Amino acid sequence: MPVILQVHELDIGMRLANPVIRDRNILLPAGKVLNDADIDTLRRSCPRAAIHISDPVLDDLVSFQDVTRDRKVAAATRRKLLRAMSSVRDKFSSRMALGGMDLRGVHEAMAYITHYLNENPNAAAMIMRPGKEASYLTEHPANVFYLSVVVGNAVRNFVRRDLGNRSSLRSYQRPRPPINVAPLGLAALFMDVAMWPLEEAFNQPGPLSPEQREIVWHHPHAGAEVLPTNVPLLVGEIVRRHHENYDGTGYPDGLSADQIPLFARIVRLADAFDAATTTRVFRQAKSPPRVLWEMTMGPYAHLYDPVLLKIFGGVVQPFPIGAKLRLACGRYAVVVRFGGNYALLPEVIIAFDENGKRLPRERLEGPFKLEEHPALRIVSYGGEDLTDVYGEGTSYTEFQMPVAAEFQTLFESVYP
């Protein structure tokens, strides 16, 4: 399994495990042994890129969690959805009513990922950041669809286990139909359909104008009104409610808790997480671990369903396998397995010294779970300081509940 390094960490002689792709073109091929010119090219062309480097010593010593299949499924689902959403956008842009439009491409993507999740119920959500080949309002719904369906499937499995564990109540319960996640996926795709006329504002660095803010405020209701006529009624209700907050501070109607449909609460989570971790012109993305912490245990936890947060935090894994993390001891660890329900505390092996140089085989430590070694706190990842996330005494099971503010920008309208 390759180690994921930042461009500034690269050294001459390292071998690329994966090709480096820039604007759909291969900048450097897989297997390339880096020289000084290669590293200089990467520093100029993609200074913030994550580079996958082969490490045969670690591969020989450690059994890395294999997420190849999960990644392929996430990428394939996304491609299918982008094609389907492009056709929807073309129809909308030509001012044709969505009406009874053909949703075969959407249903194909739904069937594809649902089949995979049924066969792999514990699949983790792979965080995909593919580039700029699609507009935000096409790419973002595809990502939210994927996250929502993975989380919805996890909720379905949670409900099944919960009912199965109540053996003493079984004889008093009527059989319940299985949870159908199709309306959830459709709503995720169409949640921002009423935002399409406002797309130019996503390149606007300043605050929204009063007219723009009015469109954003009412887009959940407006979107529900223009949905295709051949989608279930529940889809419209999810679209109407996907910006409502669990504590009642959301919009457009200020609903709270169980007043908000379950699937709308799931879309709210997925929508916020993807928006916060996606780089766009109007602001720089936050890292997945920071966003997951802010949403689940940090300042924004009060906005989301607490039960769904726990499920979400066990499905969305913020550190990819092979990620290089700086620890409080000064050395660097490599992620070998996801943290599962403790997503912010993965299983690691200490493999680099304080200067970022690979330790010799005999000095490697681990692998071990960070949840069992609280002194080995993560202090940075990808150059980002995470000391506030992993401060001493930080609890990864408790929720803090500060207050949210009214949005003034497009980013604030989605996150937190």
Image (spheres, rainbow, N blue to C red):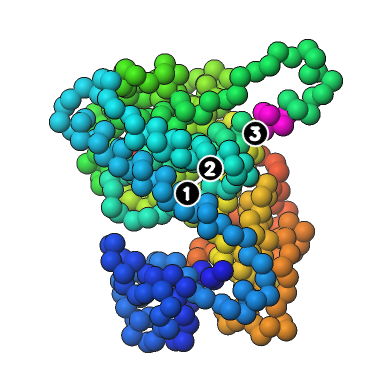
Q: Residue at x 74, y 14 (%)?
A: 173
**How packed is label 1: few (under 14 Cα within 10 Å), some, or many (20 or more)?**
some
Instruction: Select label 1 or label 3 by which is in front.
Output: 1
CA–CA distance in space, label 1 to label 2: 8 Å
The residue sitting at 39% across, 86% down in the picture is 35
The residue to which callout 3 is attached is: 157
Which residue in the protein does label 1 denote?
73
Figure disc tally: 3
Q: Can you identify the residue that label 2 sits on?
A: 116
**Which residue is found at the position 54% from the left and 71% from the top?**
3
Which residue is at the front of the view, 123 or 339? 123
Q: Which mark is residue 103?
A: none
User: SS of the residue at dot 3?
Assistant: helix
Q: Residue furthest right?
A: 168
How far is mark 1 from mark 3, CA to CA? 19 Å
Which is the main secondary structure of the residues drawn in magenta?
Answer: helix
Mark 2 Cα within 10 Å, few/some/many (few <14, many 20+)?
A: some
Type of amino acid at the residue the image marks with label 2:
Tyr
Part of the protein shown in magenta: 158-162
Residue extending farthest to the left is 94
Give 49 or 291, whichever is nearer the viewer.
49
Query: Going by the image, does 176 lie left or right of 103?
Result: right
Contact, mark 1 vs mark 2 (Cβ under 8 Å):
yes
Could you say where residue 68 lies in the image, as x and y percent from the top left? 52, 58
